[in-house]
Amino acid sequence: MSGVLRVDLDAFAANLREIAERVAPATHMLVVKDDAYAHGIEPIVRRAWIEGVRWFGAFDVRTGLAVREVLGDDARIFVWIVATAEEAAEAVAAGLDVGVGDPLLLEDVAAVGGTARVHLKIDTGLHRNGVRPEDWPQFTARAAEHEAAGAIEVVGIWSHIAEASDAEDDASRAVFDEAVHVAEAAGLRPRLRHLAASAASFAWPEFRYDLVRVGAFAYGIRPADGPAESELGIRPIASLVAPVEGVADGVVRIGLGSLDGLPSTLAGVLTIATEGGVRMLHAVDATASTVDGWPGATAGDEVVVLGAGAELSATDAAERIGTIGEEIALRISPLVRREYR
């Protein structure tokens, strides 16, 4: 016996509707990196398409190609990590929108052939990647040359922000706005601007622009030390459930361990939902864990470890060990069975 991740696609759809309403008139780009935050990319993107999502943020080319295979040619798929010239060629051939944040990648994409759709990235201070402001005029001028030659179409300008403080984020937005002006002065006419991810897109209208890249909130994962899910109007869409494997001396052994993605550091701090009420997780082994017992506990019973119907959400658990909800969600092994309803 082993654990299972049960994904409620109706809850996911409700989160998508909340996001669309909150970020309007901007368009929601659903981020599906890391196998849709470990929820399973194929059922997630299929349901998102049914719910009207047309933009998908795929992070890397491999994920972008997976989304293209599921949804076909009509989906707009944005990838922002392209590591090699070969990946650039794959991305362009598949009709992916490519995030370009350095001059070498710009040349690789322009050399592919055809007309590549690109989004130029300015580094607004996070220093994750992107072109520094002092290099931006030369970079955008070169992009304009490639566009005039028909090698690329600059459809967007984009960046990341740190969301570390209001002052820093305001400074980043000012850098971003100036970068758009510089690009336009170079002769580019980008139709799409995108700067905000989940938290900023909900909190600050001025950061929304044309697209917002929202991933975590779509899956019901709130920011650590931030507003509760209920305040945001979202809810976790998945439940991590484990079977009872045995009972001995008042201790229950459940079929979920560190190899399944349960951090061992949660031992002694994670409380879980059982048929006998809330119980403490005491030890996390490789393939199983132990929990305080309860009257009537029997092999084959189930406990809800994290997420919907659990005592704690992924972010609640993350806060107890000093990390973020995304890390807890992404650690769930692909070997854990996914069920959808």
Image (tube, grey):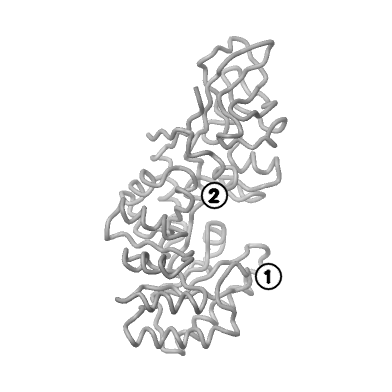
Residue 126's disc is none
Residue 281: where, in percent of width, then height? 67, 27
Give, as a three-letter code, the residue at label 1. Ala
Q: Nearer the viewer, residue 160 or 93?
A: 93
Front tag of 1 and 2: 1
Residue pictured at 61% horizontal, 21% vertical: 277
- According to the picture, the residue beneath numbered tag 1 turns out to be 167
Vertical placement of residue 223 versus 76, above or below: above
The crowd level at tag 1 (other Cα within 10 Å; few <14, some 14-19, many 20+) is few
Q: Nearer the viewer, residue 284 or 27?
A: 284
Vertical placement of residue 237 versus 254, above or below: below
- Quadrant (top left/top right/bottom left/bottom right) for the C terminus: top left
Q: Quadrant of residue 290?
A: top right
Residue 85: where, in percent of width, then height? 43, 70
Residue 74: where, in percent of width, then height? 27, 60
Q: Secondary structure at mark 2?
A: helix
Residue pictured at 48% horizontal, 56% vertical: 214
Residue 11: where, in percent of width, then height? 43, 40
Q: Secondary structure at mark 1?
A: helix
The crowd level at tag 2 (other Cα within 10 Å; few <14, some 14-19, many 20+) is some
Q: Nearer the viewer, residue 48 or 33?
A: 33
Give, as a three-letter code, the residue at label 2. Leu
Residues under labels 1 and 2: Cα distance? Answer: 23 Å
Residue pictured at 52% horizontal, 17% vertical: 301
Residue 232's disc is 2
